[in-house]
Amino acid sequence: MSPPPPRRNAPIFVVGHPRSGTTLLRLILNAHSRIVIPPEAHVASFLRRCEKTYGPLVVEANRRRAVERLVGKRRMQEWGFEEEEMYMRAMEADPPTPGGVFAALMSLWTDKERKPRWGEKTPGTYRFLPEVNTWFPDCQVVHIVRDGRDVAVSCLTPPFADLYDKGNVYEVAVRWRHAIHCCRRAKRFLGPDRFFELRYEDLTADPETMARKLCAFLGEEFEAPMLDYHRSATKNVARGDSSFHQRTKEAVNRGRVERWRTDATPDFIAGFEGVAARELQDFGYPLSGITPPTRQQVRILYERLRPRRLVKNYRPPGGQSAEKRPPAKPKTGDDEERARAAGG
C-alpha cells in the first residue's frame, strides 16, 4: 500500500444511518494518537439552523442566545465539561459563525486529549453535509454502510427501539435509502480525496486492512492500538448511550452480520427489500428471494410512494428543500393492525 499523503488536521465527520457501525468506527479512530472524536452531541443539526432562529452569530447578542441554548442541551452536558467553560469557548469563536462555534467547541477536546485533530460522529449528520462542507471546506467525510435489513432489525429491537425508533420496517427502509442517497450526493461534491465509504461487513471481516485504508485516506499512519479501542470503550461511550452499545466493549467481530436471516420474519425481510432492493444490491447485499404476497405488495407500493417529511423544513445552502412534503397522515388502529400483519 502506498504511504499516506502528508498529515493534515482537517476535521473528520463520521456518518451513516443509525445502527450501521458509526460508534464502532468512532472508537477505532478515537484510539489514534492524533485524533479525538467525542460522543455524539448533534452539534451540526443545531448550528445549521441557528442563524435562522437567532439571527447572524456575528451579532454578540444573537450568538449568546444560541450558545446558551446549545451548551444547555443534554448531549452537550454528557461531554463532561463545565457549562461555563463550553459557553466561553463558543463565545470566543473566531470567526463568529456556525462553523467557528463548532470548531471552538471541538477545541475543548483537542486541548483535553492533547491531540491535534478532531472529528465528529453523529449518524444523522449525513443530512447536513452541504452545510458541513460550507463550514469546513477541507473536511473529510467517512460514510459507513451496513446491510439495511440488519439495520432495521437493530433499530426495531429494544433497548434502542424503546428510546429512539417508533417506526416499522418500512419507515426504517425509507430512512436507510434516504441516507444512501444523501451520501451519494455528498460523494459527488466532495470527491474522492474528501469522501471515503466502507461497509460494516468489510470492517468486521478484516478490521486491520480497513483501518489501514481509512488511515491512508485521512493521511495518517496506521496504529495498532486503534484495534484495541474496546479496552477503553466504557469511558468513551456516553452514559446515555451505553445500554445499546454493549458490544463496543468487545473486539471487532462478526457476531451481528446477517442477523436478519435468523431474527427477522419473511414479511419483515420482504417489506424492507420491497422498499430498498436497488440500494441493497448496489452495495453488494444479495436479496433473499422472498416473494411477498399480493396484500403485502400493495403495502410496499404504498410505502414507497407515500409522502414523508424525512427532514423537517430542511433546505441545503443554495439548493431546494430536500423533503418539502406534507407530513404523513396519523395511523389509525386499523393501520396499526395491518402494519403488524405486514411485518411492521
Image (spheres, rainbow, N blue to C red):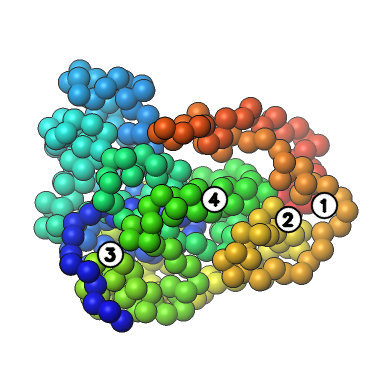
Which amino acid type is marked by label 3? Leu
Tell me the distance, in whole angstroms, between the alpha carbons under discs 1 and 4: 23 Å
Which amino acid type is marked by label 2? Gly
Residue 137 visible in image? yes
Which amino acid type is marked by label 1? Gln
> Horizontal and vertical percent for residue 284?
59, 70
Which residue matches tag 3?
Answer: 218
Q: Nearer the viewer, mark 2 or mark 3?
A: 3
> Horizontal and vertical percent for residue 258?
60, 71
Taking the spot 70% from the left edge, 29% from the top edge, the residue there is 329
Q: Which mark is residue 181?
A: 4
Mark 4 neighbour density, 10 Å: few (under 14) some (14–19) many (20 or more)? some
* Lateral position of residue 113 relative to residue 335, left or right: left
Local SS, label 4 = helix
Which residue matches tag 1?
Answer: 297
Local SS, label 3 = helix
Residue 157 visible in image? no
Q: Which mark is residue 179?
A: none
Name which of mark 4 and mark 3 comes first in the sequence: 4
> Do tag 4 and tag 2 residues touch (Cβ < 8 Å)?
no
Which amino acid type is marked by label 4? His
> Do tag 3 and tag 1 residues touch (Cβ < 8 Å)?
no
Tell me the distance, in whole angstroms, between the alpha carbons under discs 1 and 2: 8 Å
Tell me the distance, in whole angstroms, between the alpha carbons under discs 2 and 3: 36 Å
Which residue matches tag 2?
Answer: 274
Tell me the distance, in whole angstroms, between the alpha carbons under discs 4 and 3: 23 Å
Name which of mark 1 and mark 2 comes first in the sequence: 2
* Lateral position of residue 45 relative to residue 309, left or right: left
Mark 1 neighbour density, 10 Å: few (under 14) some (14–19) many (20 or more)? some
Tell me the distance, in whole angstroms, between the alpha carbons under discs 3 and 1: 44 Å
